[in-house]
Amino acid sequence: MEIAQAKNPAVASSGNASYFKRSPLDWLAAVLLIGGGLFAFDRYAHFMDGYEQAILIAAIPTFIALAWAWGGLRNLLAGAAVLALAGIALYDADLARAEQAFFLKYFLSSQTAIGWMCFLFFLSTAAYWLGLLARSDFAEKTGMALSWAAVLMGTTGMLVRWYESYLIGTDIGHIPISNLYEVFVLFCLITALLYLHYERRYNTRKLGAFVLIVISAAVAFTLWYSFSRDAHEIQPLVPALQSYWMKIHVPANFIGYGAFSLAAMIGVAWLLAERGILATRLPALAVMEDVMYKAIAIGFAFFTVATILGALWAAEAWGTYWQWDPKETWALIVWLNYAAWLHLRLTKGLRGAILSWWAVIGLLVTTFAFLGVNMFLSGLHSYGAL
Amino acid sequence: MRFAVSLLTVLSIASVIGTVLKQNEPYNSYLNQFGQFWFPVFEALGLYSVYHASWFLAILAFLVASTSLCIIRQAPGMVKEMKSFRTGAREASLRQFAHKHMTQTALPRSEAAQQVSHYLATQGYKSRSKEQADGLLLAAKAGSWNRMGYLLAHSAIVLICVGGLLDGDLPLKLEMMLGAKQVTSLDKPFGEIGAESRLGPEHWSYRGNVFLPEGKRSNIAVLNVKDGALLQELPFSITLKKFHIEHYSTGMPKRFASDVVITDLQTGAETERTIEVNKPFEYRGVSLYQASFEDGGSKLQLKAHSLLPGSTRISDAQGEVGGNLQLKQGEETLQVEITGFRPFNIENMAQPSESEKNTLAMLNHALGSGAKAPDSKDMKNVGPSFSYKVRDAAGQAREYNNYMVPIEQDGRRFFMTGMRETQADGFRYLRLPADEDDKLDTWLAVRAILTTPGEHALIARRFAAKAMSGRGVSDTMRTRLADTAERTLQLFAESGFEGLGAFIKDSVPENEREKAADVFVRVLQGCTWEAWQLQRERKKLKPLQLTTERADFVRDTVNSISDSFHYGAPAYLALDQFEEVKASVIQATRSPGKAGVYLGCALLVAGVFFMLYVRERRLFVLLKDSGEVLIALSSNRKTMDTDTEFARHQEALESLLNHGNRTS
């Protein structure tokens, strides 16, 4: 006997209604996103090709869904929009204003904003550690707030940098994800956002101390790179990078890198807790295992997409979708590494120490693929060179 | 499973080799790197082209075979599992589940069944019911696509590998193993290369470069294979009309583009296109890409200035990049191979400045916009340059790189000519000072006088006369100075500062050497000034007043003449005029496996998302005749989500089933 599967209309519609039963802030965000998107379309559509117009339109519901799904992200979007627009208004299409206008020089110009991001991430790391060691809920909440502030300043810095690149010359302007300096900032932002997401999902702030270490390391590298090599200078795009693929390949990759780094730090926390170090302060082992799996799953999914996008782009730029260039090969190694991790966990049902160690070693492999290849091996991915 | 993980690990490690050792380099460079003993060992292991080595392909083939086997073995079971509702599940086995809960209901069984199945439907579950011995079992499932994900992802791997293998050089390898094809070293024109090194247009898959000077046409792509090449014939010919290269103001390249005409060799149809980086063009299954650019045989008008002692000989020569020319210098005939030409060179001309290095200054530097150009950069076009090799009788070649116009350094202008003995070295530059007309003439003339032994006495006398013109100076003193000056000139004319140094070392006590060297240098500079004046006198030009700039010129002249003894060639080649001919390198690829690979990629993405983000869950509700209710949940993903989901269902079903209780 088959039971009727017709849905009760009342229940179904109430399910829908609850999605649209939103706080005024959510609705305000939606209205602003629609308004902003349509304004941008009206004003700039004729500079865009069909794909770009479609992406702009699709971005409106995507960002609304993201903002509605996560209040923190909604506030971040709003904050970054306000600050970036303020920065643009202060610039008034004149680069020299970065040295003259007080708010630009000390707050909103891209280098300064990214500098603030670096500073706030360091502070946040300290606060999370204080919270962990002193079992202080307040310190952990401060750490979270500082991380959000850092992400806000970093996002603002990137958006303003995007604008600045167009002020140098309309032919020079491009999205700031084209060299190692820019992607390091992107890495910090993505890793922090992923962490903040899990912090909310699992309702624990105890892992922040560990995840913020890897972000701080990236920040330290960014600062060194900027001070010693003037890496922050905006460079025009070489012909090989003038492609729409860059705009999706690079962020997708960094969601992968960010998630893998996060998983590795949780692996470290797991291994410490298992040995009784900080065990009473950290979340339960099962929770950490779950976060680790979630992070690697999302990282793997995005890394798969990113690698495929890279192959599609390579086919267009270099004439073949795969040619065993060192960067490609190392991407494959990273992919195989996490494919093996997932096999162990999903098919063998393995948990615990082996997977934690594997995730930690995975970070070394990932770091080599991300940085080591550019430093030690020569190949086609020379734009990321140190 | 352990097997799959091991295989992935082995593949990773094997892949590392090819990233550490640079692949597909000329065999000579490997020979230099590893030496006679290891070179053949590594060659046999296929390390110079790891990813095409038989053993690596074997690993891949093994991966494909074992993955296929996995799919074949698992697929029928998985499809059955996807379809099945497991309505036959017994109470005893349900009680073994990790997630189970016992409860009661007072509702009549049919109504309870109605309520539960409705609930299951709203939760996205599909359900079936079956009457069992002591009750009614409602068996529901959701997320069956998870298993589909497995099938998709694993067949994607097979598809991608097979497509990739088809596009690789496996077919070509077979042909070569059978001896049907042989590589050529490209030492003759294409026309003379025989069929044993040619591949017809029907050849399955390839990737090669078409070299196209402006105005020329070609239908041959060169494939690099092992230590040689094969010629791939294309079903069309490509004519390069014009090659464009554009730069940003910073000197970075902005655009490379080739205007080409493609002529179909069968139909004669012509297609005009512009091929750019990131904008390839596909014609009859062959994709054409802008790969690189080279010089296409620019025509250079040269002046060879003899550097033989005392010579001021200038000879004209014409050459072409890629061509050879012979230059007679004295008894010797130089073999000159012109290797390259650059119409412009953008160099960083900034002087390293001593800027403040305190923390505040550094911080200030880091603030502001990302657009600030660091002070250490000042990009300038320093004009054309060309490079050539001079081969001696023994076949040894030195490489030279000469700039056409003088380059400013330290406020003075120099003609720069670089020399290196091997490819591995950087160029060492000889800086020849430009005169007040921005020409090399003065330097050449002064050098000729200073290196003519017959002139030494005259210059020395003139120098001594000027240096000791006061009263109270005896003729003997003047003569002694003149003798010293003459000796200095002789030594310098033979081997520059080196000869002087050797002389000082031999004849001056150690503690006075520095002072002596200083005197010699001053004498030399004085004589050089005299030689300059003498040269002007002979050309009936007015004598010059000594100024700081002219003193600099004299010093630079002395230094560069001394350095020129290490120049290694008896002539300096100056670029007089040029006519640039550019060439574009278009890459032609045919990869029929691409469609399979792309389909595989799409399946892989779908598969990974299904596997990771669709959880297969089975929810069982056994409504026993006794009024007892057993709720059980199973999932093939043991995550915390399953725990929370079960808790949610348990609570919801309990309140649903007890609803009647509370109202009654």
Image (cartoon, rainbow, N blue to C red):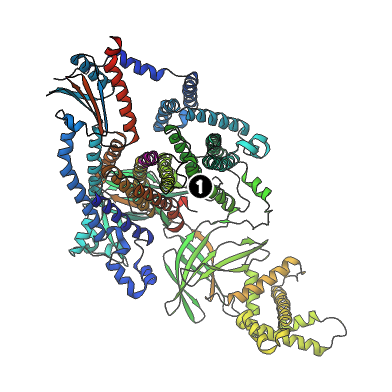
Residue A311's place in the image compared with B644, above or below, is below
Residue A332 picture location, percent across and down: 34, 50
Q: Residues within 10 Å of mark 1 (few under 14, many from 20)?
A: some
Residue identifier under label 1: A218
Q: Residue at x 77, y 88 (%)?
A: B479
Q: Which chain is disc 1 placed on? A: A
What secondary structure is the magenta-colored segment mainly?
helix
In the displayed structure image, the side of residue B160 where residue A222 appears, left or right = right
Residue A106 picture location, percent across and down: 65, 38
Residue B648 picture location, percent across and down: 33, 25
Under circle 1, the secondary element is: helix
Please tell me in which quadrant of the rendered image residue B80 appears: top left
In the displayed structure image, the side of residue B497 where residue B128 appears, left or right = left
**Count of labels in the image:** 1
Magenta residues, start to end: A277-299
Name the foreground residue: A263 vs B510.
A263
User: Is residue B268 visible to us here?
Assistant: no
Q: Residue furthest front?
A: B626
Name the foreground residue: B442 vs B662.
B662
Q: Does the magenta run of residues contain B292? A: no
Q: Residue furthest left?
A: B133
Q: Amino acid at mark 1?
A: Ala
